[in-house]
Amino acid sequence: MRERERRSTPRVETGVLTRPRTEPGQRFLDGFFRQALAWPKAQVTVAQPRLERWDRAIPWERVAPLLAFGGTLALGAYLRGIFVVTSDFPLNDGGLFYAMVRDLQRSGYVLPATTSYNDAGIPFAYPPLAFYLAGILDSLTPLSLIDILRFFPLAFSLLTMFAFVGLARALLKPGLPVVAATAAFALWLRSFNWEIVGGGLTRSPGFLFALLSLHQLYLLYTRQGRRHLVLASVFSGLTVLTHLEATWFLAFSGLLVFLAVGRSRQAVIDSAIVAGATLALSSPWWLTVLLRHGLSPFRSATDLGFAPDLGIDLGLLRLQLTEEPFFPMLRAIALLGALVCVRRRWWFLPAWVIVAFALDPRKALTWSSVPLAMMAGIGIAEVVLP
């Protein structure tokens, strides 16, 4: 009796409903009707948890880096924007640039000979591209010039993070090193603190164009191609027309890129073409200044703005590179990355930091934030999270 009940009771095996063994005649009839009507075996679908189905449906190997990039860029945007949004006036400086934009507007966008700032007869010799953009925005949009001096530098500082991502993807291994380097650059105080203030009207776009030009120069030396040649020339010209100190940063950084990856006859030719095109694109400005004022404004631009002393060099020797208020975590991780670079004989990033401090100590903390952030990405990927 129990054996009969056991045989008549269906059993479940791994989600498929099966029936017990039957008599030969019954099996024949079942097989006949199944073949005739093409009946499938009865299936029992085991319900999977919703989260598990989502986990299988989403390609996390592609989505995770995007989420990491999005999170770091959002955090960087917050850190930059919170200072600007909580103030109703341009931060720190920008009075000279405000006066120069007004001078440009009054002259019908023809370069004036001097600026009205303090009635001191200062030559209007500053690269004028940012002044043109600010004046046009002031004339064509509801924004006031004060608003432009507040938000224009911030907008270009945000774009600089994306320019850094492109350069980091070209120089570093894909994946974690690039994501970690982007996070370090987004959090690096000196990568934005002087770029989001009122004077960042020229500093911020100058930094952006310099990084874009360096990216294209690297691609030009490693992949060649007319597209990279044209873009490198355009971005270099925009850098010259925006900020002279960023132009100096682009010059010595571009030379380092050439020495690292571009030591070839074709690279020399391409470099000469880029240099010539850059001079041609920026010639309407520097030719006007030369004809009006001679070389004096350009010689003055090479002044450091302070008396050089051992304190500048000792800042590098003491590794005061990040201005972090508490424990210098980014600096420590960047030093780990520097050790990895030295061990693997990849001298480009450490040399970039040293050259920045040697050739432009006044702005070195800003320029060195680029290679230091990349070394921090290497330190995280190779040492902290190998």
Image (cartoon, helix red, strand yellow):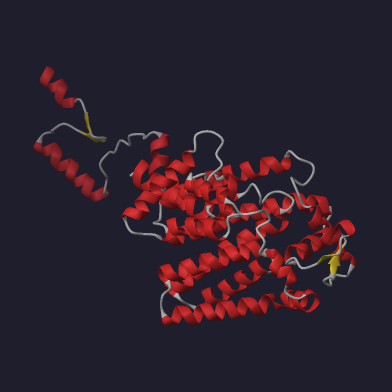
Say left or right for 353 vs 363. left
Q: Residue furthest top?
A: 1
Which residue sits at x=42%, y=61%?
Answer: 348
Left or right: residue 39 compared with residue 385: left
Establish if 374 lies above or below 286.
above
Q: Let me know if residue 311 appears in the view.
A: yes
Query: Which residue is found at the position 27% from the left and 48% from the top?
Result: 37
Q: Nearer the viewer, residue 280 or 291?
A: 291
Is residue 63 shown to the viewer in this render? no
Identify the residue at image location x=37%, y=41%: 384
**Closest to the observer: 82 or 131?**
131
Q: Residue at x 55, y 39 (%)?
A: 324
Relative to the observer, which residue lies in front, 220 or 199? 199
Residue 300 at x, y = what percent? 71, 65
- Percent position (x, y) of residue 188? 55, 45
- Total numbered badges shown on the rendered structure: 0
In the picture, the quarter occupied by the C terminus is: top left
Is the residue 346 above or below the residue 274 in the image?
above
Quarter of the N terminus within the rendering: top left
Where residue 302 appears, x then y in whole percent? Answer: 66, 64
Q: Residue 108, image x and y in percent?
A: 88, 70
